[in-house]
Image: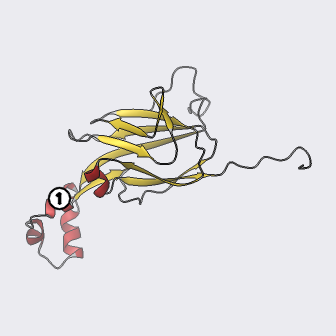
Amino acid sequence: MIVTERGMAGPGGVPKDVDREVVAFFAEMNVTDSWCYRENIRRRTDLPVDSATAQPEFETTNLMESVNGYVYGNMPVVTLRQGERVRWYMFAGVNRLDHHAVHRHGQPATVRGRQTQVMELGPMMMGVADMVPQNPGTWLLHCREEDHFEAGMAARYEVLPAEKTASTGPEE
């Protein structure tokens, strides 16, 4: 749930000082907690389920670090426009060890009154970053904790050039 200060929301609930809102949830998932993981082993390997789960690295290889449930940059690309006022809502997962250093490449944002590209999040923490993208291109959004990044905690966002406005007269 995102709450906007009284009198600051427009008719659709979006804050009046924002053009776009983006939500990013950073969480660890253990695939073995899935109700269908045993069926996936049966379908995708030649190993008996008990043999596969007994492998020493089985538990480790099933830990996935995600952004909005997606891993390794497979989340649909968030598309922003140059000059647009964007508010990022960043959330950390429930694991007591979930500590994230969320890094948005290419664009600084204002977090708690200061310009930065990194936001620290502890377990079950939320943070807000306001950004006005200036650099067109495709950029990385990820956790800087090395084991989280290596386990898939990365996504992409794209900044498109500002839309051209109609000219009021001949170009000089």
Residue in the picture at 13% in, 64% down = 57
Q: Residue at label 1?
A: 60
Q: Is residue 48 rendered to the left or right of residue 94? A: left
x, y percent for residue 10: 61, 29
Task: Evaluate whether residue 1 shows in this view.
Answer: no
- Bin the neighbour count of mark 1 within 10 Å (Cα to Cα): few under 14, some 14-19, many 20 and up: few
Does residue 127 show up? yes
What is the residue that sits farthest to the right in this orientation? 170
Side of 162 where 30 appears, left or right: left
Using the image, determine if residue 22 lies above or below residue 35: above
x, y percent for residue 36: 23, 62
Q: Position of residue 132 (x, y in %)?
A: 58, 39
Which residue appears farthest toward the front when viewing the image? 172
From this view, report whether residue 3 is shown above or below residue 153.
above
| Image coords of residue 58 (percent x, y) | 14, 64
Q: Secondary structure at mark 1?
A: helix
In screen coordinates, is 27 left or right of 61? right
User: Residue 7, relative to residue 159: is it above or below?
Assistant: above
Type of colouring:
secondary structure
Give the residue at x 51% y 48%.
106
- Number of labels in the image equals 1
Residue occupying image coordinates x 21% and y 41%: 97
Tell me where residue 31 sits by quadrant.
bottom left
- Nearer to us in this view, 153 or 28: 153
Front one among 113 and 53: 113
Q: Residue furthest bottom?
A: 46
- Three-letter amino acid code at the position of disc 1: Thr
Tell me if residue 60 comes above or below residue 117 in the rendering.
below
Q: Is residue 107 left or right of residue 65?
A: right
